[in-house]
Image (cartoon, rainbow, N blue to C red):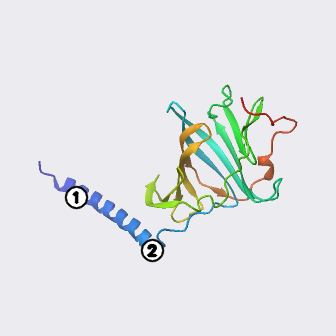
């Protein structure tokens, strides 16, 4: 079958676009340190995300989340640590089964907070530090959602950060809470100090008991 002139021109144009994209990615790699410096998280940020969490039966649960992060020494011990707050809408990893949303708070323990529920899911767990990727292995440059990203691997956890702005996370994948694997696709990161009260437990509520 012979191609028409128009089809032939379209095919060549498509091939040129692919070649140019590969050349740009190669140029980006050559123009900077290889492997690049491992990304550091900002001291504070918030971002929305779409999470697909696979349960123990390998069933996916796609839902929205709002993530707040603060790296602070305003803690009970006075030591620097990460504080995390994850507001989940539509799924709560097997906790708060009859609720449409919940908050997972990670300070000195992992707390599950929902209507008529506040309990400790995992005692003795802090939020991740800013440099949680300090031992990560760089796997190269990829494209995700039209963005050029660095791919990192660290102890069963994978992370993708923007090449041009390493402080911006694009995707995370790894085991999390009760799920053996989840994928988190982040929206734009709003980098700014976070209100410390976001990480407070509910007032006049006993949150000291283990989660059922």
Figure check: 98 above or below 74: above
Q: How far from the left and from the top, in percent, is residue 153?
A: 51, 55
* Mark 2 residue crowding within 10 angstroms, few (<14) / some (14–19) / many (20+): few
Q: Which mark is residue 93?
A: none
Residue under label 1, please give it: 9
| Residue at (52, 66) in percent of width and height | 164
Residue under label 2, please give it: 31
* Mark 1 residue crowding within 10 angstroms, few (<14) / some (14–19) / many (20+): few
Q: How far from the left and from the top, in percent, is residue 33?
A: 49, 73
Q: Residue lying farthest top?
A: 98
Pointer 2 or 1: first along the chain: 1
| Residue at (83, 53) in percent of width and height | 76
Quadrant for the C terminus, please.
top right
| Residue at (69, 29) in percent of width and height | 96
Q: Is 73 on the left-hand or right-hand side of 183?
A: right
- Label 1 element class: helix
- Label 2 element class: loop
Q: Is 116 on the left-hand or right-hand side of 61?
A: right
Q: Residue lying farthest right?
A: 204
């Amino acid at each position: 079958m012979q191609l028409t002139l128009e089809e032939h021109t379209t095919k060549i144009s498509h091939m040129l676009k692919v070649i140019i994209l590969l050349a740009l990615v190669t140029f980006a790699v050559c123009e900077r340190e290889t492997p690049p410096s491992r990304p550091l998280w900002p001291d504070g940020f918030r971002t929305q995300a779409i999470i697909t969490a696979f349960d123990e039966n390998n069933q996916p649960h796609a839902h929205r989340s709002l993530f707040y992060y603060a790296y602070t020494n305003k803690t009970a011990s006075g030591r620097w640590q990460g504080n995390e707050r994850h507001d989940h809408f539509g799924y709560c990893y097997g906790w708060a089964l009859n609720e449409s949303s919940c908050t997972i708070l990670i300070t000195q323990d992992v707390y599950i907070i929902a209507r008529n529920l506040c309990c400790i899911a995992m005692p003795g767990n802090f939020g991740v530090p800013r440099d949680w990727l300090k031992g990560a292995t760089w796997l190269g440059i990829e494209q995700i959602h039209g963005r050029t990203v660095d791919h990192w691997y660290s102890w069963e956890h994978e992370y993708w950060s923007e090449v041009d702005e390493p402080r911006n996370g694009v995707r995370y994948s790894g085991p999390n809470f009760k799920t053996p694997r989840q994928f988190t696709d982040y929206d734009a990161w709003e980098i700014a100090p976070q209100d410390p009260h976001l990480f407070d437990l509910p007032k006049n509520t006993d949150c000291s008991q283990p989660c059922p």
